[in-house]
Amino acid sequence: MYEFLHYQVRDAMTADPIAISPKAKLREVEALFESHDFNGVPVIDDQWRLHGILTKFDLLKAFSFDTHALVPHYDEIMEQTAEMIMTRNPVSVEPQLPLSRLLQKLVEMRTKSLPVVENGRLVGIIAREDVLKALRRAAIHHEIPAHEEPQP
Amino acid sequence: MTTLLYTHPTCLEHDTGFGHPECAARLTAILNVLKTVPFAALEWRDAPQATDEQLTRIHTPAHVERIFARIPKRGHYAIDGDTIVSPHSGKAALHAAGAVCAAVEAILNGEANNAFCAIRPPGHHAEPNQAMGFCLFNNAAIGAAHARAVGGLEQVAIIDFDVHHGNGVQAAFEHNPAYLYISTHQAYIYPGTGSREERGVGNIVNIPLMANSASADLRRAWQQDIEPALREFQPQLILISAGFDAHYLDPLAELNFNEDDYAWLTQQILTVAKDCCEGRVVSMLEGGYNLPALAASVAAHVKALMEAPRTAQRSLIKDILERQKAKRNA
């Protein structure tokens, strides 16, 4: 487990992640969620600057009760664009953040993933699964079982 | 004491399209319960169609014309995303509004203590010049105006416990102190009206409730807002816009009332009615979209109506006519 303390976000993140444009239709975003195991997807411009994050919760929120209809209308809502429902100014992390601190952040915020930003550009995304994988890797390769004598 | 039940088979023919929550099965579920033994004492009556005169006390002639112009010969027509009409919708809407008018007349005439109108389409969202939110004609407002027109009543109260605000009733009466409109509803959902600040000419009492409000919140609303307003107004007739979509199992909103709450609220209203207006109450169906919950809630509501505290049963209309005659002779 000590190994884990040396990991940084960049060691565990998904680099060059799939991202969408602010003008992407919710229909396309939904298809993306359907075909990939994403919790959310970063929203970027053509300079890879991060504008927001669109999560499955944001997508659900588009269907929650509001004042303009008794029943939400699927086709109408699916024609809306990402920028209409995304979470703006999302929390992001830097690639050099220790993974142990990233873990704390995820737990405290109860969030499933965070975008990774370097010099104002999106460079990756880090999710719960990535951290779990890093924990496992750190333990398997470097944990010394208690009953074994250390090798000379 | 008799409770009248007004309904009409045409109300089952108002087809809103596949899967629409405001469906004929709602009314079927209700009528099936009301046909069982505990409700044997109900006096069933066929609802007549509302007349143009009755409709245009609330709606513009253009609105009435437009509704019928939009009824398709076959298939469906969407007035808005929520409000769908089909070949029999116009007739159904006439019977719905007509039911309330007939019930009002019967109650004012002393034929029974109270009445329930098992009708659809519902009415409380329909504005004087705009159909919306599943509603074509404003059954409650039309009934209230009818009470004033035929019975010469000076104070008519409408209590609306549907989970959505009755923007149509409010729009019809917010400038007219002869009517008191009291509504409990969930805040920040459709249609977006119904804040406490909307007070009309002091005759509108809106009680928006936050999502997940339940029995205790309903009781608080009754004690703090509904009962005081009602008693101060001293209605001569109470109409109830009885929507049951504030039930905890309803799919269209997030309030958590149950059948017992509806029974309790109905009893409270009847107690005030007994004190103010010899028990005269006309209730009508608005929303409620979980069929078992709807049937159970209507059963609790109608049971309470049937068990209303006893009052002298006499004709108010006769009173008024006699008073007018005496005045003329004097």
Image (cartoon, coloured by chain):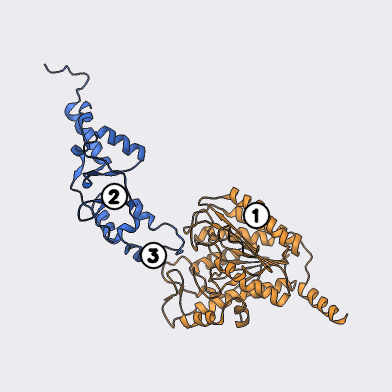
Q: Gap between marks 1 and 3, in whole Å?
A: 35 Å
Chain of the residue that carries numbered disc 2 in the rendered image: A
In depth, the one of B22 and A16 nearer the eye is: A16
Q: Identify the mark at residue B248; answer none if there is no mark.
A: none
Dot 1 amino acid type: Asp
Mark 3 Cα shell of 10 Å, populated few (<14), some (14-19), many (≥20): few
Q: Look at discs 3 and 2 and give the one toward the viewer.
A: 2
Question: Is residue B237 visible to us here?
Answer: yes
Judging from the image, what secondary structure is the residue with disc 3 in? loop
- Please name the residue that numbered disc 1 is placed on: B225
Q: Residues within 10 Å of mark 1 (few under 14, many from 20)?
A: some
Tell me if A91 is positioned left or right of B90 in this view.
Answer: left
Which residue is depicted at the point 66% across and 72% down? B103
Q: Is residue B307 visible?
A: no
The kind of residue tagged 3 is His
Host chain of mark 1: B
* Chain A as rendered: colour: blue
**CB-based contact (under 8 Å), mark 3 and mark 2:** no
Q: Which residue is mark 2?
A: A40
Residue at 52%, 83% in the rendered image? B65
Q: Have a look at marks 1 and 3 and say if they share a chain.
A: no
> Where residue A73 is drawn, which disc sits there?
3
In x, y percent, where is residue B273? 72, 61
Q: Earlier in the sequence, mark 3 or mark 2?
A: 2
Chain letter, colour orange:
B
In which quadrant of the rendered view does residue A6 lie? top left
